[in-house]
Image (tube, rainbow, N blue to C red):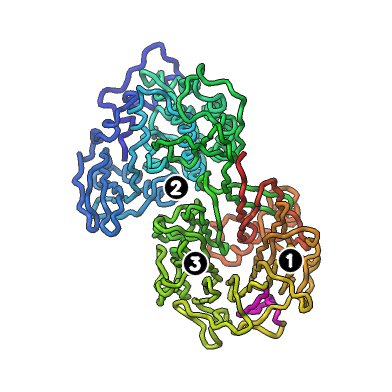
Amino acid sequence: MELKEIRPAFSQKPKHGPTQTTGEMSVLSRFQNLTLLGPNPSPRQTLASVAPREGTAGPQHVLDLTGYRKVRSVGQGSFGVAVLYERQSDGQQVVMKQIALGNLAKPEREMAMNEVEVFSKLHHPNIIAYLGSSVRGDVLLIEMEYADGGTLAQMLAVRSQSEPLPERFVLNIFEQLASALSYMHSQNILHRDLKTANVFLHGKGTVKVGDFGISKIMNSNVHAQTVLGTPYYFSPEMCEGKEYDEKSDVWALGCIIGEMCCLKKAFTASNLSELVGKIMTAEYVPLPACYSDSLRHVLGLMFQIEPIARPSASELLQYWIPLIYKNLGSAEGFQFEAHHSRPKQPELLLKVESMVHDDRATTKSYADGSTARVGTDINQNHPIERTVLYQLHSFGSSSSLAPLHLPPTIKIMQVATRGQHFVAVLEDGTVYSWGEGDKGQLGHDALETWHHIPMRIDAIRSRRIVSAAVGDGCSIFRTASGLLLACGDNSNGCLGQGNRASLLVPKQIAKLEHIPIVQVSSGTTHVLALTEGGIVYSWGSSDNGALALGKRIHIALEPERIILPQLVQNVREVYAGPDCTILITTQGDCYCCGSNAGNRLGLGRKVASTATLRMVHLDAAKRPKIVAVSVADTHAAFLIEGGFLVMFGDNSDGQRGAGHKFELAQPSIVRQLQSRYVVNVKCNHSYSVATTDDNCVVHWGTRTGTPESAEDCSESRAGSNNEQRPSLATVANSTTALANILTSLYKRETILEPADVLAVAFESLFLAFALRKNIKKALEHSQYQ
């Protein structure tokens, strides 16, 4: 909770001189109860207490909270106090905002409760984390993440008499704030009070947006009946009392960027009338000459008077900020340079996926910790490989590709998913997770319905993770030393802890503590682990023999060794599919057990399942070497040496790529791909996807999706008779009606022969990808030039 830069005036209402026009008086009448503070408040002012509003109490008594040790007060305002505590259970420092509801008028109470509602909906690495809330007596407590670096306003106040900030430092913060705004707006939330005092500095160059007291959950455009926020950051439409939307937040973001570059407010004035006049005409302080023309251009776009002319936060993040980096010389922007002294060099353009290492960087500062920091050694211009993770949406003739919000300098080694939640393992051993978290499977020490943005799992930061596997509501992690850790739902025993207790953070599997594991794989309800000596362990549950522990054992709450038949030797790889187990040997032979639904394991239509390991026969005469396998509910794909695909199981949706939907009793090769080299394959319930060595994504079968073009939805429109579709709210209590509306929204399409969905010119495309209906996550390695 920070001191606002506007406050109730204690003097009489300002008197307007006779020279003011009627229009000016109409605009200024909205600000008659507000006054301006000085344009550059000191750090002390930022955290100082403000005079209580009329009818409210003075400074509040700080509560002693059980399980917390008070450290110090970090802020006080008219609504309450913000206190830094240390959580005794884990030593974590948190901020507790304490608001005395009994001292507030009804609008102020509503504002306090609104902060909880908005805050609890946001989960993003560049937004102060909401940790919980409660009411004790008449005091509302909001627990939140503590940012130990102070605020951006404090940092700029200290630096106000110094040289301008390096452009790459400005871009680093610009990128993070745009990411936070893009996420908020995707959740239909306006911040409405974005300013430097509400931007918090965190360790390693991270910035976080906070203070959501006057934020708004948008159902439509917001009509401003009253003034909310800080005048220096108001948009023209807010000054005029017009309806405003997320483009007002973009204007405020422009004010922050201008303030960082100029070390003073983007719109400066000696009085409120002059300030409003400058805002209405977009008369902002020009950037110093040391900043690039690209940054000037983008700031000019953000300060367009008409909201529709401003870029969205998403457009800034995905196009404009990368363009500034692209046009910024590779050796420029790391330190302040006067424009006239900048050396004349051939222009070195950085592409959006372009990054080189700066071996000269020896000092560490706040700016140095940025994930967006880019450097160059002009003597050795060696590229560094990095990873970009994209979400691909494809249906009909339309497709879209958008990068996920991950640090831009990372290299991803693996992405694990079963469609509901996602885990990314980085080269440095850190792990990010996102998606469904209602069973604790994300490892964030919380139950989350859906976590939209990838977030680092801090609970295992001290360990170097090298791989991961995910099941139905659970996650398994393997360390460099071969230890296994697990978290999430344990109702099926998949966590291997010897009990059924679920875990919110990863915990080591004790039974395998002294048995180094080289590979782990998870099905929906069971897990497999392989040692360097070829010993296989299984645990979890299966009614169809997928545990390979015998016919009578359907559940194992901790790892149990599988007794392998004499023929199954030198196991190279284990694969746990949905209720089935597959072992691949060093000779390329394949053995399976578990459910044979749809004859997906090739055991014959009459064999429903098997609890003993049996060999998978692709071609009895040639015995091709199996490289990889993917199994869905009723069909499977085997990738064999030479880049060929052999399919088993059901074909009722065309998922075997045979060019038809008729039943196939025998294994079949995907003939349309025989002339191409397949490097990876994944099977979903009713379709299959593969990637080839020429960087193409190939799809066949039946998928569900939402048409995005007139051509794609022409069929559905033809049958609608122009009837208005009912809203979800009107059918929420009717199962039949809800099913009908979902059927009208989501369409099915069948592709009988493999067709290219996407082709891109990157190196080492799609090391891994996952599927969830028509949404595919594609992992792509690109090399900066």
Q: Nearer the viewer, residue 28 or 648?
A: 648
Q: Residue at x 24, y 58 (%)?
A: 67
Distance CA(mark 1)–CA(mark 3): 30 Å
Q: For the image shown, how many numbered marks are present on the structure?
A: 3
Q: Is residue 727 left or right of residue 47?
A: right
Quadrant of the image containing the N terminus: top left
> What segment is highlighted magenta in the picture?
588-603
Given contact means CB atoms under 8 Å apart, are the residues at marks 3 and 2 in contact?
Answer: no
> Vertical placement of 446 versus 234: above or below?
below
Q: Amino acid at mark 2?
A: Pro
- Magenta-span inclusion, residue 594: yes
> Which residue in the protein does label 1 denote?
645
Residue at point 20%, 53% (across, down): 64
Which of the marked residues, 3 or 2, is nearer the chain's N terminus?
A: 2
Checking the image for residue 473, the label placed there is: 3
* Quadrant position of the C terminus in the picture: top right
Mark 2 or mark 1: whose residue is earlier in sequence: 2
Q: Distance from label 3 to label 2 (Cα)? A: 23 Å
Q: Quadrant of residue 461?
A: bottom left
| Image: 365 above or below 519 | above
Q: Which residue is mark 2?
A: 125
Q: Identify the image quadrant of residue 262.
A: top left
Circle nearer the viewer, 1 or 3: 1
Q: Give percent across and percent down for residue 516.
A: 47, 69
Q: Position of residue 393 (x, y in %)?
A: 64, 52
